[in-house]
Amino acid sequence: MLSEFSLIDRFFARRARGARPADDGSLGIGDDCALLAPRPGEMLAISTDMLVEGRHFFADVDPHALGHKALAVNLSDLAAMGARPQAFTLAFALPQAHEDWLAAFSDGLFALAERYDCELIGGDTTAGPLNLCITVFGSVPPGQALRRDAAQAGDDIWISGTLGDARAGLGVLRGEWSADATDAATFRRALERPEPRVALGLALRGVARAALDLSDGLAGDLLHILERSHLQAQVAVDAVPRSAALRRLPAEVQRRCTLAGGDDYELCFTAPASARAAVEAAGRSVAVPVTRIGTISDLQSAADNPAIRWLDAAGSPLTLTLQGFDHFHAD
Amino acid sequence: MLSEFSLIDRFFARRARGARPADDGSLGIGDDCALLAPRPGEMLAISTDMLVEGRHFFADVDPHALGHKALAVNLSDLAAMGARPQAFTLAFALPQAHEDWLAAFSDGLFALAERYDCELIGGDTTAGPLNLCITVFGSVPPGQALRRDAAQAGDDIWISGTLGDARAGLGVLRGEWSADATDAATFRRALERPEPRVALGLALRGVARAALDLSDGLAGDLLHILERSHLQAQVAVDAVPRSAALRRLPAEVQRRCTLAGGDDYELCFTAPASARAAVEAAGRSVAVPVTRIGTISDLQSAADNPAIRWLDAAGSPLTLTLQGFDHFHAD
């Protein structure tokens, strides 16, 4: 096994920060621990995600895409906090070490890491059923972190990009619906190569109030903001942005994919109505479309529960059944 | 699955630091990221370890012991750096969520975490083959970190505690050798409940030069210090400390368990000869025995490779065959 695992050194350790101290005292792979500090006056934002074969990706997934996505979903958590990526650790279990697979996986991983100047500083490898665990570190001034509990009544609710394409792609792969080759490629790209909204998260510091990234679907994720902020929301279902490709699927599929699709990795955030121009300017500054889909309001009474009221195009309440619409990872 | 996984909230999130900001701005579970900073003027020491069923522990392991060990092996990395434990994240995959198992596992985990004031600040749970990935954070002044590349010619080599009991315990479980019930219990405790040498690591700041923790066996691990420091070592084989229980096994088994056993989680460190009294005082101050087992010296020539020369009681060179003596995790 050792000779196989020396491949890992070749594909990972050589592209990682080594254990030579930098000017700031930081230290990478090769010692018992890495040493890292946030920027002066800032804090480290830390998130960890575990990806398991069959649950978060298919066994035959393109390993380059898997390397990209494993880091992308973690960078998305930094984006949702308004944190600047700094470093990550990678622990993984592999049934066996295939050179081609590791070469492609590490290429996908480091291509994204290098784009965000995010260095591999530590890791662990072992034999076992395929499992990827990344912990990512960013830096953020604590007062500017975009927290889930910071929404206020009267805030607008915003979405970056479009929702639903990743779930549409999963449906095509599963045979739940079909699409022409061009649309299917659009969906599959959304599923396999999500783009973390890091630049938007940074641009929203001091502009947005609450934020999170959409990994489990808008309906479930927005509820996290409402629960932590003790508020409710009204969302205009037809205002939720979707791609031209998704618009070619049946209306009911569109609705379920956008509201309960999962794997979107777009940001959902709130901002005061007075900040509309600033939010739009932030989106333009990083070339990411931002769309206003609803508003935050107070609970009606102390006994009221945080919830989302869905509205149709005429502003009338809709009753949606989104339960049981599983996405790739339902836990 | 969701109802099962709500058990996880009950056993973990409730004992974790929540996402209410502390006075220092730190933030725990419940947002996209945790927020953490090292102590003023210090850096975060970070280490990650992945434990896989069948490779690092048996499927029928006592879950309380597993919770202890999963965190202990990570705290041991902090100890080896001279870092003070601060926080950890836990990501794990479980085939199914059994309440009794999770209760015992989380009890073992938090009993150790609370002893070291080390808070759970983030995590991820998913369905999948049993896999535990912990990333641990400590705080250390960068100039006082005990690094692997800091050994110098003339340094003494020291070991904390005793070596070999964990490997002896694995051998008993595997039927490689036998021991009476009392000794078998001693061995098994060493295997399942290693005690991270955190207090010793802190006491050695400013006293020791290089350090690491022994996870793969003395022969392999000491070589890491030698390689990173470009030095060689002489070790008196019979000076390597071992328990009374281990002394009752055959001499050849003792030697292999102490030198290539793995899973010891004792510290191996170097310090100048002038610091002998200070090292012994550090050990006494935390009630951990420390034993001098050899010395560090320069390579004979530029072409020479870092290596360990093993010496017998008379000081004569020994040729040891330690290859192929596998311990619990050989990767």
Image: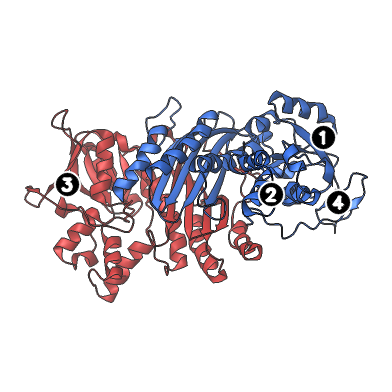
Chain colours: A blue, B red
Q: Label 1 near label 3: C-beta < 8 Å?
A: no
Residue B331 at x, y = what percent? 33, 51
- Give the residue number, with chain letter if any, for mark 3: B235
Can you name the residue that lies furthest to the front here? A180
- Give the residue number, with chain letter if any, for mark 1: A272
| Marks 4/2: CA–CA distance | 41 Å
Residue A19 at x, y = what percent? 37, 33
CA neighbours of label 1 inside 10 A, class few (<14), some (14 to 19), many (20+): some
- Give the residue number, with chain letter if any, for mark 4: A299
Within the image, what quadrant is residue B251 found in? Answer: bottom left
Q: Earlier in the sequence, mark 4 or mark 2?
A: 2
Q: Label 4 near label 3: C-beta < 8 Å?
A: no
Q: Mark 4 falls within which chain?
A: A
CA neighbours of label 4 inside 10 A, class few (<14), some (14 to 19), many (20+): some
Q: Mark 1 falls within which chain?
A: A
Q: Residue at x 24, y 54 (%)?
A: B260
Depicted A171 relative to depicted B230: above or below: below
Tell me the mark number nearer the camera, choosing from 3 and 4: 4
Within the image, what quadrant is residue B164 found in? Answer: bottom left
User: Residue A178: which disc?
Assistant: 2
Q: Label 1 near label 2: C-beta < 8 Å?
A: no
